[in-house]
């Protein structure tokens, strides 16, 4: 029996617009007192009418294009009719027949995942269920009602829980690059609902499919992965027991219990499947000209995959380094602004920061070997010293404290062996904090690398004298010279050129 | 002085000339309403406090030599589906009994801003669902011309109040004839403008792609004055027009009746129309002909399909627009219900009037899976045909003249047990809403029982100034609009 | 021709979809009324609408979009003012089933 997982993902992204989707109430709903950002429109009062948010629509198209989708020049909203207290109007404004964008794709782990569509809709309010004096109550807060959501629907091309997680990570990264949402799964600004079933090829040559299950309320990325794995397993077991196969009517909705790490069958929402979609009469067709679409496309910054490719090809970074730097959009851009400045240094007198240059504009521009050396050098500082410092302080990288010239000069000093790599790491952090030139800091602290053989020989002689046991160890095992080098570096307060130090020690210990 | 027979500009002149105060005028109307309204029951709420408050405001402005609004001193009655902030708005339904809105409709606010004085909220069929005002969740309004007769609907209260001179003008809405039909049955003038001319924001929605707020008055001139204020783009209504609004009042004499081509659609003059109604409507056409207009028979072949299109699309939109009425954030509520589904079913079942329920059910059915293509999509396609027919005929003639109602007013209770019969009475009005074009209803005579008869002038999109000019000139030559019921 | 007879079962289903409770008496009265209205719709079956696009809105003017600027909202008090069923700033519905 051959079992192939079939997974599709529905992702809802809350856009960080100022105002809601169909009214001008503030779209902020976190840590806001209940029902303080409402108006006739989002409260669904009699006579209220929706007016769509232009930025939200543009961002939906922007995201769609970034996912490789094709925009529909004309699209429209529809009413999805169902009853629930947190849905003020008794229908949700969404898109069905003609969404803003269609037919995109993402490549995840070498697999092409097709994206059916991305469309705009509005969020519902929040319901809090509690029991007071034996009575079940639901408290409703409409602050979130009407907040813009983009729904991204993939085709069921995902074949493992790990791939699903990576798909979600990539979408999250792209969304953050575009700056249109925090895409925070824990906070609920990005929600994922997998739909899962199995393709089973039995030993006697038959191919069958298990019934579809949609899983709701998974509140973390790890949770999604675990939930999918659990469900894949559960479906296989159930199939072995019941042999039930997929039909038009046996799709189920399952909830995720994060404590027990299992999915469970949710109560069927009676009559909920007939949403009676029809075009929204209160909002005319939304038309975008090709020029407007082009402008939206032009506003898309270089996306993660393109950046990674550039970092590896033009800057010569390792795959790991490239992935790590590009994980965060602004971190990558600040790093890159230094490299761009370096590349243009000889061409442009004022160091105009040109961030996000495309791959084709950079290749062959100037001495690429030198660029690679500098890029690698700077990457090491960013990933080593700077990232560590930021982790310790919990801060984000502050662009105003980064001075490209400082990095150029530091690179020159290290290349000339005036400053060791170790010292470079120290002084760049101090420079970031104080604003002083890192080479000056090194000088003032006497950390300029000593490459003068004479100087080093003096210190080496002292180290040999003070460490007889280590000398003996060395004589027995030349590989143990590391200790003596370390002592020499310590004695020189890190300023000795370690290569020369080693040579001199070896020479002296012959 | 009888302030109720004056025009809107005349009232304003009185104030400016200090011949009367706004307070005096208001008190006059309040007294008249107290005397007459118990007979006709046009009003659900009489807004005495607000009226006198506004009047005092206006009088203060005059005393301080400040500018007063263009409608200063004019008394308006407002159909109870227009939300009026801080004033109970019931939509004539038990669902909203006691509802005090937190905001006002744009059209109403525009009129307040021009110093119109609201005298009361008028009765209607609940949520405007009906053609006789008999479906009201509170009581039936009587036709001022004969108290045993219906005033028409759904804006029956506004039409009756205007006919009885209990206001200078009244607000209504026309989704399938709900301004034009009661106007004609009550012998007053009423304008259904082009869809999108007046903002729908703040009016309980019936059918979103059909609803047109509009005005009743005794003269076209006053309708023009008021429409000037209400018309135009509202940022709160994405379907409201961006067109520049012409100065309707200054264009009342602009159309040259000589050589004006008037189309008489043959489908509107069949056996179905009462002979007396037909005679009076044709007479109106003849009056215009006597001034040089050219009458021409035209054809709107899809007329007989209009009712089916209307009664599929309108209830469909109604069914969704009514979903917000569940007693959670506003409206009457009921604590019963063992779970959320029965909560909804009980609240809506308990307070919604039969006609409200009927239309929601018809609409839900038409949109439900399995029927959507056969009904909703099909009706929407036929809508295209009907719209194209009007555009094509109106490219050929300058205006279309037609009857409004196949009969004059009928007896209260006569048709209410047969909804289909009621729906069929809309035959001459619904196609205009299906197409979205404007139409002006004008009184053109009386039948042998002294019941009013009206006709309509139908123009192309945004041709309000044209039809109002023809109507204005018709009213210069005739005096049906000046007749008053004896109350 | 098609007979669109509405059964009681259909009416029950539609009433539930629409969340409106109908008494037995109402169902008795409504059923024939609804049937006559819906049968009337069949007049459209004879119309040829091949190649006709549906009209969902009669006026199509451009740019229904709104700039992303925050405007005024109701105060909490105003938002809750039209109902008595409130608690600590929330709207309250009783007797609901937990989701």
Image (cartoon, coloured by chain):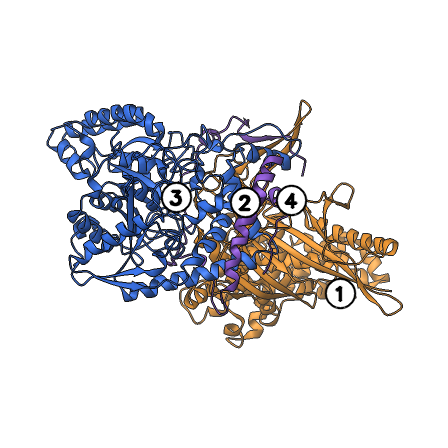
Chain colours: A orange, B blue, C purple
Q: Nearer the viewer, mark 1 or mark 3?
A: 3
**Residue B438 location (% of width, % of height):** 31, 53
Q: Chain of mark 2?
A: C
Q: Secondary structure at mark 3?
A: loop
**Mark 2 burial class by Cα count in 10 Å: few <14, some 14-19, many 20+:** some
**Mark 4 burial class by Cα count in 10 Å: few <14, some 14-19, many 20+:** few
Q: Is residue C18 in sight in this rendering? A: yes
Q: Nearer the viewer, mark 4 or mark 1?
A: 4
Real-space Cα separation, disc 2 to disc 3, in angstroms: 33 Å
Q: Is residue B246 left or right of residue A84?
A: left
Q: Is residue A93 in sight in this rendering? A: no
Q: Dot 4 corresponds to which residue?
A: C8
Q: Is residue A108 left or right of residue B194?
A: right
**Mark 1 burial class by Cα count in 10 Å: few <14, some 14-19, many 20+:** some
Residue C33 is labelled as 2
Asked if marks 3 and 4 fall on the same chain, the answer is no
Q: Dot 3 corresponds to which residue?
A: B201
* Residue shown at 51% from the left, 44% from the top: B359
Q: Chain of mark 3?
A: B
Q: Nearer the viewer, mark 4 or mark 2?
A: 2
Location of residue B462 by image quarter: bottom left
Asked if marks 2 and 3 fall on the same chain, the answer is no
Q: Chain of mark 4?
A: C
**Residue B68 location (% of width, % of height):** 19, 35
- The residue nearer to you, when weighing A203 against B389, is B389
Q: Dot 1 corresponds to which residue?
A: A506
Real-space Cα separation, disc 2 to disc 1, in angstroms: 108 Å
Q: Secondary structure at mark 1?
A: helix
């Amino acid at each position: 029996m051959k079992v192939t997982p079939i997974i599709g993902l529905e992702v809802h992204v809350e856009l960080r617009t100022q105002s809601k989707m169909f009214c001008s109430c503030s779209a902020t709903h976190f840590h806001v007192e209940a029902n303080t950002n409402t108006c006739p429109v989002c409260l669904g009062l009699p006579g209220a009418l929706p007016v769509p948010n232009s930025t939200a629509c543009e961002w939906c198209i922007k995201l769609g294009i970034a996912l490789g989708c094709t925009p529909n020049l004309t699209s429209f909203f529809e009413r999805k009719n169902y009853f629930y207290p947190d849905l003020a109007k008794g229908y949700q404004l969404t898109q069905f027949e003609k969404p803003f964008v269609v037919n995109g794709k993402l490549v995840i782990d070498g697999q092409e995942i097709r994206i059916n569509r991305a469309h705009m809709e509005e969020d519902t309010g929040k319901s809090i269920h509690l029991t007071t004096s034996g009575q079940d109550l639901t408290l409703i807060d409409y602050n979130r009602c009407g907040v813009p959501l983009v729904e991204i629907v993939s085709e069921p091309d995902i074949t493992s829980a790990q791939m699903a997680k990576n798909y979600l990570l990539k979408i999250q990264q792209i969304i953050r690059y575009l700056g249109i949402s925090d895409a925070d799964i824990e906070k609920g600004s990005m929600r994922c609902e997998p739909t899962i079933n199995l393709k089973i090829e039995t030993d006697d040559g038959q191919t069958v499919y298990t019934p579809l299950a949609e899983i709701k309320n998974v509140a973390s990325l790890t949770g999604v992965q675990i939930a999918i794995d659990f469900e894949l397993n559960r479906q296989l077991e159930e199939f072995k027991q019941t042999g039930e196969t997929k039909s038009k009517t046996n799709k189920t909705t399952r909830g995720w219990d994060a404590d027990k790490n299992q999915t469970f069958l949710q109560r069927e929402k009676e009559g909920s499947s007939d949403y009676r979609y029809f075009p929204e009469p209160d909002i005319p067709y939304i038309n975008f000209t090709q020029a407007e679409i082009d402008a939206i496309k032009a506003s898309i910054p270089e996306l993660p995959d393109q950046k990674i490719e550039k970092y590896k090809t033009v800057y010569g970074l390792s795959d790991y380094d490239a992935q790590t730097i590009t994980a965060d959009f602004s971190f990558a851009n600040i790093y890159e602004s230094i490299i761009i400045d370096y590349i243009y240094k000889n061409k442009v007198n004022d160091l105009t920061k040109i961030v996000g240059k495309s791959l084709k504009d950079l290749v062959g521009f100037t001495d690429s070997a030198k660029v690679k050396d500098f890029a690698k050098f700077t990457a090491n500082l960013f990933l080593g010293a700077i990232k560590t410092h930021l982790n310790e302080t919990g801060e984000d990288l502050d662009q105003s404290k980064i001075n490209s010239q400082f990095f150029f000069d530091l690179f020159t000093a290290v290349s000339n062996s005036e400053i060791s790599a170790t010292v470079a790491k120290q002084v760049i952090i101090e420079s970031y904090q104080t604003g002083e030139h890192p080479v000056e800091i090194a000088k003032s602290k006497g950390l300029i690398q000593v490459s003068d053989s004479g100087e080093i020989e003096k210190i080496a002689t002292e180290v040999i004298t003070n460490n007889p046991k280590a000398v003996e160890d060395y004589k027995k095992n030349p590989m143990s010279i590391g200790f003596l080098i370390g002592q020499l570096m310590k004695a020189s307060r890190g300023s000795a050129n370690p290569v020369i130090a080693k040579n001199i020690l070896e020479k002296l210990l012959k | 002085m009888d302030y109720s027979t004056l025009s809107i500009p005349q009232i304003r002149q009185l104030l400016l000339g200090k011949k009367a105060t706004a307070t005096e005028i208001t008190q006059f109307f309040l007294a008249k309403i107290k005397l007459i309204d118990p007979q006709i029951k046009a009003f659900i709420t009489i807004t005495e406090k607000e009226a006198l408050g506004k009047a005092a405001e206006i009088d203060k402005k005059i005393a301080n030599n400040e500018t007063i609004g263009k409608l200063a001193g004019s008394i308006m009655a407002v159909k109870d589906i227009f939300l009026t902030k801080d004033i109970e708005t019931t939509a004539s339904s038990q669902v909203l009994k006691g509802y005090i809105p937190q905001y006002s409709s744009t059209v109403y606010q525009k009129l307040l801003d021009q110093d119109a004085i609201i005298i009361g909220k008028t009765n209607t069929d609940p949520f405007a669902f009906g053609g006789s005002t008999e479906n009201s969740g509170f009581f039936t309004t009587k036709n001022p011309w004969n108290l045993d007769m219906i005033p028409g609907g759904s804006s029956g209260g506004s039409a009756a109040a205007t006919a009885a001179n209990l206001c200078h003008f009244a607000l209504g809405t026309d989704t399938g004839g709900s301004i034009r039909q009661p106007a004609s049955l009550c012998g007053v003038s009423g304008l259904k403008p082009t869809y999108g001319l007046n903002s729908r924001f703040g009016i309980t929605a019936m059918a979103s792609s059909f609803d047109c707020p509009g005005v009743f008055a005794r003269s076209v001139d006053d309708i023009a004055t008021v429409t000037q204020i209400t018309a135009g783009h509202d940022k709160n209504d994405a379907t409201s027009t961006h067109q520049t609004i012409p100065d309707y009042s200054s264009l009342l004499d602009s159309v040259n009746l000589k050589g004006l081509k008037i189309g008489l659609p043959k489908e509107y003059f069949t056996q179905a129309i009462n002979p007396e109604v037909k005679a009076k409507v044709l007479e109106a056409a003849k009056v215009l002909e006597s001034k040089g207009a050219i009458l021409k028979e035209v054809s709107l072949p899809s007329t007989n399909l209009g009712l089916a299109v209307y009664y599929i699309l309108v209830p469909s939109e109604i069914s969704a627009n009514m979903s917000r009425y569940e007693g959670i954030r506003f409206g009457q509520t009921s604590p019963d219900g063992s779970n959320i589904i029965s909560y909804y079913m009980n609240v809506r079942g308990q307070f919604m009037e039969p006609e409200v329920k009927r239309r929601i059910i018809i609409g839900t059915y038409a949109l439900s899976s399995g029927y959507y293509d056969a009904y909703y999509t099909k009706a929407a396609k036929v809508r295209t045909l009907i719209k194209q027919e009007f555009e094509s005929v109106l490219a050929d003639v300058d205006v279309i003249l037609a009857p409004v109602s196949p009969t004059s007013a009928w007896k209260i209770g006569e048709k209410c047990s047969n909804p289909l019969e009621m729906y069929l009475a809309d035959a001459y009005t619904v196609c205009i809403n299906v197409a979205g074009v404007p139409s002006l209803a004008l009184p053109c005579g009386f039948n042998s029982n002294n019941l009013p008869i009206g006709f309509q002038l139908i123009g192309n999109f945004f041709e309000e100034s044209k039809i109002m000019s023809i109507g204005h000139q018709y009213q210069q030559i005739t005096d049906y609009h000046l007749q008053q019921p004896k109350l | 021709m098609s007979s669109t007879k509405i059964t009681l079962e259909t009416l029950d289903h539609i009433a539930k979809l629409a969340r409106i409770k109908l008494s037995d008496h109402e169902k008795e009265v409504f059923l024939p009324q609804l049937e006559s209205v819906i049968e009337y719709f069949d007049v459209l079956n004879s119309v040829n609408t091949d190649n006709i696009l549906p009209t969902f809105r009669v006026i199509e003017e451009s740019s229904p979009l709104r700039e992303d600027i925050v405007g005024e909202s109701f105060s909490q008090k105003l938002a809750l003012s039209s109902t008595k069923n409130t608690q600590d700033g929330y709207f309250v519905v009783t007797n609901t089933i937990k989701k």
